[in-house]
């Protein structure tokens, strides 16, 4: 129960993070967003780890666990977040949400293949619905509202980056689960710090090696508060997510977290009303995707076919 509740809170924070990040990338870039949010997450998780970590947790963490946390950090916080930013810049937070529901399919498939978790008929129906949700959202491209948006709507680019981020976001919970033989929320927080530190280091190498230094230095000052706010709320979201994964199975945490799509729309209506789509196909896509997520979660509660 606690794991499910923390997953729901995490979804709410992630929804607000997505909206604030959307404001930043409207005129900024994904690389600029990463340069702010990744180091900020490392600092916040590092400070929390110093307070929370116990000696027993460090004793129980072997090198294989460390490398799983490192892999999860690079896959989720660096690659997944970068492609998520690119997807959101292309189509907006509201459309990106249903596209990224494919995350749950990836998590469930890997949970079955790697962790040995079992699913049943309801789960397979849920997976089908989760793949249909983004197809419904694509119908919004035909809406007249697209022409009135205050940004260039790029659906195919959004799908491309959205699917990549879904694969990254869907695989990272399995890596975290593999890292934590001992189910401890303190260890989960420390793992999030390890993941952010690894992702930040790789990001620094990429910025220097591939010539992104000037781009990062030219970050518009008006975007920095949005990126910082996004970084704080994604810290809260990821912190709760890691703790939830320490308390509950992947197939419970991942579907519940996808309710963030609803929070995205609510917060977008308040904060970004002129740079998002709010048409009927968005709600249909969200509804189909959430129904799929619910069907995936029901077997975990002992209700299934």
Image (cartoon, rainbow, N blue to C red):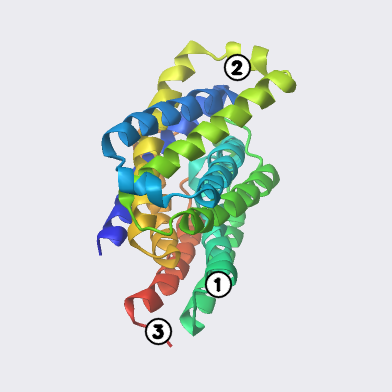
- Packing grade of label 1 (10 A; few <14, some 14-19, many >=20) is some
- Packing grade of label 2 (10 A; few <14, some 14-19, many >=20) is some
Residue beneath the point at 37% across and 43% down: 189
The residue nearer to you, when weighing 218 against 151, is: 218
Q: Which labelled disc corresponds to residue 261?
A: none
Element carrying mark 1? helix
Is the residue 7 above or below the residue 249 in the image?
Answer: above
Find disc 2 in the rendering and name its residue: 216
Residue beneath the point at 73% across and 18% down: 211
Of marks 3 and 1, the one in the foreground: 1
Find disc 1 in the rendering and name its residue: 112
The residue nearer to you, when weighing 66 against 110, is: 66
Q: Which labelled disc corresponds to residue 304?
A: 3
Label whose residue precedes the other's in the sequence (3 or 1)? 1
Count of numbered badges drawn on the protein:
3
Give residue 278's position: percent from left, percent from top.
Answer: 46, 47
Is the residue 110 above or below the residue 125 in the image?
Answer: above
Residue beneath the point at 58% across and 43% down: 80
């Amino acid at each position: 129960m606690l794991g499910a509740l923390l997953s729901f809170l995490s979804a709410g924070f992630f929804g607000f993070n997505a909206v604030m990040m959307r404001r930043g990338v409207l005129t900024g870039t994904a690389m600029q967003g990463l340069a702010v949010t990744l180091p900020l997450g490392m600092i916040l998780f590092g400070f929390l780890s110093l307070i929370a970590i116990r000696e027993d947790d460090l004793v129980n963490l072997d090198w294989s666990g460390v490398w799983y946390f490192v892999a999860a950090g690079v896959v989720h916080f660096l690659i997944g977040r970068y492609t998520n930013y690119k997807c959101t810049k292309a189509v907006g937070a509201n459309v990106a949400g249903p596209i990224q529901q494919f995350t749950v399919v990836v998590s469930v498939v890997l949970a079955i293949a790697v962790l040995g978790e079992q699913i049943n008929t309801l789960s397979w129906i849920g997976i089908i619905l989760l793949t249909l949700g983004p197809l419904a959202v694509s119908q919004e491209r035909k809406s007249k509202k697209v022409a009135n948006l205050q940004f260039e709507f790029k659906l195919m680019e959004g799908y491309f980056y959205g699917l990549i981020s879904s694969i990254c976001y869907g695989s990272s919970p399995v890596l975290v689960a593999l890292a934590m033989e001992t189910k401890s929320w303190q260890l989960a927080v420390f793992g999030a710090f390890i993941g952010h530190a690894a992702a930040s280091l790789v990001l620094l190498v990429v910025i220097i090696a591939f010539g992104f230094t000037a781009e990062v230095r030219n970050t518009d000052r008006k975007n920095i508060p949005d990126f910082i706010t996004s970084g704080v709320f994604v810290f809260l979201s990821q912190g709760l997510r890691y703790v939830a994964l320490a308390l509950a199975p992947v197939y419970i945490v991942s579907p519940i977290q996808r309710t963030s799509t609803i929070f995205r729309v609510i917060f977008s209506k308040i904060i970004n009303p002129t740079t998002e789509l709010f048409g009927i196909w968005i709600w249909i896509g969200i509804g189909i995707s959430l129904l799929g997520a619910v069907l995936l979660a029901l077997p975990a509660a002992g209700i299934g076919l």
